[in-house]
Image: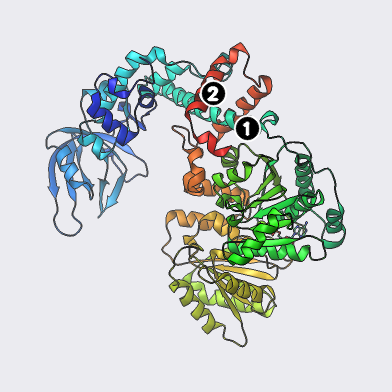
């Protein structure tokens, strides 16, 4: 039967079960069920005996018979199930889903238990283990391995147990195995020793042995990553680039003036290299879509400045977007300063600009009376249109949704787009999220930067921390103290910040010391005033929330204290640390926590104290947090793989990308006979999957 057949018509399903499968597992066709993979396998050769169960780190399984089921009453209500085999007895404990457990577990019956033994009140037992009936279907279907599928309480309650799913998939394979068609070419299959697709589907559901299982998983992961990369790479190829009439051939007066008169340092080789790469794009006749990556403090702003002057010298308008009001304002200020002697009209457009002023800015954009507009996403609202927009620079892109990027690209005569990241992104992520962009990397910091010394101190060292601050201030340096308070837009609890601020004031009284405060609930103008006082060295201490996270540049600041540092993510911490170490003096980053820090939190602190390398930190972040949490909601759609995992399958991702690259190079139109499977599959994916439209 064809794979697009409705699941209702599979033997054993029918309308009622179809509805449940659809609702609970989003399975509506044969194809969907075929691609519903086990998340683990019961390997009967690896069953524990209860007497051997130790308080280990890892998951184990054993078979036992229930001897008693007991529910405690009152506070901390739980179910304690005693289960035994011929070697001993152990407790299984549940705190949640008690009714369901009581229904499912029966005394004197045998179950397969899978879980992690823990020490609970001095006894080894299992808390919330997975349990399955130990019967033929669960045990015998496929020799050694039995597949265990993800389930939900609703599914199990309506009788669609693991063994039912097994049965359904077995039915499906017997009627549809011949409808599964190969998607890869013979070449790729034989060169990389990949299982053919039928074998892979058969074995991922019902593996005969470990090797078959591994190779089946490899095949299906490869396939998923390969077709993703293939599409991303196609978008990147010249033929798919949009033609552009913006050919920035000239290097004009403004660029020369900046280079000759305004820099008090030499560009690093890395900066020169990326400017060259970008320039090449700008005169290629095609729209540029380039990602500029570089560690905090590597000098992306000056690169952006050169690029935008090239556009302006070629008589175009430029738009520079930042993710937050404070950063947009900071850019506006910095760039205005750099370009003060230039004949260039610059305006700032953010949400808090007054309507009247906004109206006149919008009008000036339309009539080409503004060369450079700097702003937040206010600049891509529907009512804003440009006269001659030739270049868009998006700073700290990860906070912009892909859709927003898309809106700018939608023009009839599309502008060049340069995306700049705040911190480095792990290679695998940038290869997927930004896989359709060309990438430039600044892999060098300006000379003379001292390595920032980073410490993790417990609250007991508060006095030492205060003394450090005093010493630095007496040497003429300035200090940031940062508190973890959330978003600019979010209603927030000031308490931590304000308590902190008060204790800082007590410790550092005026008039000897002056303190600035900046947080998300202040009016932008007030923030500006406070920031300005700090920038001008009128205040020595800046107490702030992480609104200062991105972009803020005060080279005289030598120390950043991060309070409750465990509440920050790694890339945030790295960004924050990047606020110091911008001048020549030794810089410090002090991470303050109390002693109650999670395992994960400790790893973050260790990563920070061990390395200053943003690329390493990004990798660690990906490992600790997982890709979904690292990206915004908008972007995580694309990494929602069915089977592949961007963290665990890095090598496979690289391989898939290489194979896809080679294919495109050898047979761009996929017209060779040997590539017909790939062509058919690709067309099918393009027809059915929406996620592609979102990133192009
Ligand atoms: P980021 O890449 O984090 O945005 P910035 O553009 O803010 O970094 O630059 C950080 C600091 O380094 C700024 O004070 C800038 O003036 C300075 N800087 C940039 N390039 C150089 C260079 N080639 N030599 C010395 N200092 C530089
Ligand atoms: Mg920056």
Return the mark for residue 682. Answer: 2
Q: Quadrant of the C terminus?
A: top right
Which mark is first along the chain, 1 or 2?
1
Instruction: Name the residue rendered at 13%, 37% in the picture.
Output: 106
**Mark count:** 2
Q: Nearer the viewer, residue 120 or 580?
A: 580
Q: Dot 1: few (<14), some (14–19), or many (≥20) neighbours within 10 Å?
A: some
**Above or below 325: residue 107:** above
- Label 2 SS: helix
Judged left or right of residue 112, residue 465 is right
Instruction: Name the residue rendered at 61%, 26% in the picture.
Output: 660
- Residue 245: x and y, percent? 75, 39
- Residue 594: x and y, percent? 44, 67
- Label 1 SS: helix
Q: Is mark 2 within 8 Å of ligand 1?
A: no
- Residue 623: x and y, percent? 50, 45
- Residue 438: x and y, percent? 68, 39
Q: Quadrant of the N terminus?
A: top left
Q: Which residue is mark 1?
A: 235
Instruction: Name the residue rendered at 63%, 66% in the picture.
Output: 357
């Amino acid at each position: 039967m064809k794979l697009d057949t409705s699941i209702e018509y599979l033997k054993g399903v029918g309308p009622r079960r179809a509805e449940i499968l659809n609702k609970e597992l989003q399975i509506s066709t044969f194809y969907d069920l075929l691609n519903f993979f086990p998340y683990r396998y019961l390997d009967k050769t690896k069953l524990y005996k209860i007497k051997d169960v130790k308080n280990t780190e890892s998951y184990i399984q054993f078979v036992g018979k229930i001897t008693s089921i007991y529910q405690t009453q009152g506070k901390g209500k739980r179910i304690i199930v005693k289960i035994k085999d011929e070697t001993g007895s152990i407790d299984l404990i549940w705190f949640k889903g008690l009714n369901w457990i009581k229904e499912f577990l029966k005394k004197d019956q045998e179950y397969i238990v899978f879980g992690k033994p823990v020490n609970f009140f001095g006894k080894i037992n299992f808390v919330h283990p997975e349990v399955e009936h130990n019967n033929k279907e669960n045990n015998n279907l496929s020799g050694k391995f039995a597949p265990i599928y993800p389930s939900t309480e609703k599914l199990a309650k309506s009788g669609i147990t693991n063994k039912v799913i097994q049965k359904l998939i077995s039915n499906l394979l017997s009627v549809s195995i011949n409808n599964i068609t190969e998607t890869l070419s013979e070449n790729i299959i034989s060169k990389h020793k990949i299982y053919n697709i039928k074998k892979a589907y058969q074995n991922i559901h019902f593996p005969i042995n470990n090797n078959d299982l591994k190779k089946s998983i490899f095949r299906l992961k490869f396939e998923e990553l390969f077709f993703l990369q293939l599409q991303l790479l196609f978008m990147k190829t010249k033929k798919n680039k949009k033609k552009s009439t913006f050919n920035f051939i000239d290097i004009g007066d403004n660029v020369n003036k900046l280079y000759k008169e305004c820099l008090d340092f030499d560009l690093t080789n890395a900066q020169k290299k990326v400017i060259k790469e970008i320039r090449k794009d700008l005169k290629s006749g095609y729209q540029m879509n380039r990602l500029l990556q570089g560690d905090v403090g590597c000098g992306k702003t000056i690169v952006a400045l050169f690029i935008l002057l090239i556009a302006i010298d070629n008589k175009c308008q430029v738009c520079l977007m930042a993710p937050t009001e404070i950063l947009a304002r900071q850019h506006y200020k910095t760039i205005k300063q750099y370009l003060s002697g230039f004949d260039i009209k610059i305006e700032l457009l953010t949400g808090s600009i007054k309507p009247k002023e906004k109206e006149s800015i919008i009008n000036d954009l339309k009539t080409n009376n503004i060369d450079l507009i700097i702003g937040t996403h206010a600049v891509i609202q529907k009512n804003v249109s440009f006269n001659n927009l030739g270049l868009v620079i998006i700073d700290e892109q990860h906070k912009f949704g892909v859709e927003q990027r898309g809106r700018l690209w939608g023009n009839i005569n599309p502008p060049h787009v340069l995306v700049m990241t705040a911190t480095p992104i792990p290679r695998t992520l940038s290869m997927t999220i930004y896989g359709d962009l060309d990438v430039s990397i600044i892999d060098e910091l300006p000379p003379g930067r001292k390595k920032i010394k980073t410490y993790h101190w417990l609250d007991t060292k508060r006095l030492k921390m205060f003394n450090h601050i005093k010493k630095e201030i007496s040497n003429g340096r300035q200090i940031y103290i940062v508190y973890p308070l959330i978003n600019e837009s979010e209603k927030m609890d000031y308490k931590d910040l304000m308590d902190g601020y008060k204790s800082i004031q007590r410790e550092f009284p005026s008039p000897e010391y002056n303190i600035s405060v900046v947080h998300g609930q202040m009016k932008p103008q007030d923030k500006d005033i406070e920031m300005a006082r700090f920038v001008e060295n009128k205040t020595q201490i800046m107490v702030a929330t992480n609104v200062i996270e991105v972009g803020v540049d005060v080279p005289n600041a030598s120390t950043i204290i991060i309070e409750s540092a465990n509440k920050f993510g790694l890339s945030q911490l790295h960004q924050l640390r990047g606020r110091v170490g911008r001048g020549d003096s030794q810089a410090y980053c002090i991470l303050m926590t109390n002693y109650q820090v999670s395992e994960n939190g400790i790893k973050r602190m260790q990563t920070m104290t061990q390395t200053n390398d943003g690329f390493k930190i990004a990798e660690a972040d990906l490992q600790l947090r997982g890709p979904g949490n690292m990206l915004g909601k908008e972007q995580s759609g694309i990494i929602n793989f069915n089977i592949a995992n961007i963290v665990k399958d890095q090598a496979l991702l690289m391989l898939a990308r290489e194979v896809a690259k080679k294919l495109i190079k050898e047979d761009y139109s996929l017209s060779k006979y040997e590539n017909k499977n790939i062509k058919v599959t690709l067309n099918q994916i393009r027809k059915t999957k929406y996620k592609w439209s979102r990133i192009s």
